[in-house]
Image: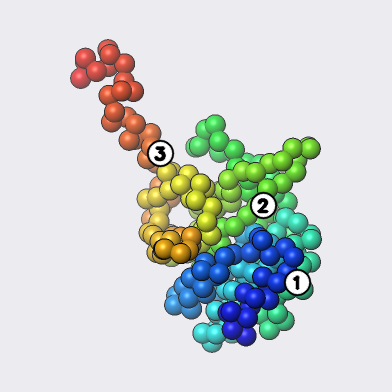
Amino acid sequence: MQLKNLYNHFASHKESQWIMKAPNAQALYQFVKEHKIKKVLDLGTGIGFSSAIIALALKDKGETDYHIDTVEQFDKCITIAKKMIPDELQKNITFHKSEAVVWQTDKIPYQVFSIYETLPEGDYDLICNDGPSPMLLDGHFIDLSNATITKMLLEDKLKAGTFVVWDGRFHMLAIFERYFADNFYLARPAQRGDGLNILEKKDTPVIFKDSKLEAMKQFTYFKDENTKSSQ
């Protein structure tokens, strides 16, 4: 199966508004083919397109022992994904159901995020950060920035060399870069026509730094007069 045919297959589904855009799909397919990747975590199965792209790329470059764990909060999405992903690609994919929950960390005060409550264990070569989706909670519509990757990083569950894919989600990427930029290389920046950014975990202990706070400290505007006069 060719990537174009796979895209058209998913684009024909009535829920196709949720799938990755064609330029991003092409960029992800090409990146996976060009890098050493065998174990993948897909955060946000949706109707299965991201997992299918990655499986196709790995199959096309001759990998046979690869595996993809894909995590989703909605039973409906898992059911659709199992029907939509071709059998030849699905045999190396495991589906995981996880609730989406609200999460906070003392390191980032006054901000609330969404994460997957449970995750499969593994040392992943590539992680797609595309979920959880918005949710209904106690009658309220909850649409929060995703922080499963943030929690994994703080718990030292990202090995050196792990690639983290951001399909759009620029707001969450900006938050992540504010606090954790020193932990990653920019392996693949978004380019004209797509919105795919890919980071690579550095081989260093986890570094936390509020870059905006550090920058603010340099501006005299935010210092009182007594502080300025004593310097």
**Mark-to-mark CA distance, 1 and 2:** 19 Å
Quadrant housing the N terminus: bottom right
Q: Disc 1 on helix, strand or loop? A: helix
Mark 1 or mark 2: name the one nearer the start of the chain: 1
Mark 1 residue crowding within 10 angstroms, few (<14) / some (14–19) / many (20+): some
> In percent of the image, x 68 and y 72: which residue is there?
10
Looking at the picture, which amino acid does disc 2 mark?
Ser
- Residue lying at the far top in this picture: please name it: 226
Q: Nearer the viewer, residue 164 or 39?
A: 164
Q: Nearer the viewer, residue 4 or 37?
A: 4
Mark 2 or mark 3: name the one nearer the start of the chain: 2
Whether the residues at callouts 1 and 2 have beta carbons within 8 Å, the answer is no
Task: Please name the residue that numbered disc 2 is placed on.
Answer: 133
Residue 198: % across, % down:
45, 62
Q: Tell me, yes or no, if residue 225 can be seen here.
A: yes
> In percent of the image, x 44 and y 77: which residue is there?
34
**Mark-to-mark CA distance, 3 and 1:** 41 Å
Q: Nearer the viewer, residue 157 or 97?
A: 97
Give the mark toward the camera: 3 or 1.
1
Task: Please name the residue that numbered disc 1 is placed on.
Answer: 82
Q: Is residue 224 left or right of residue 166?
A: left
Looking at the picture, which amino acid does disc 3 mark?
Asp
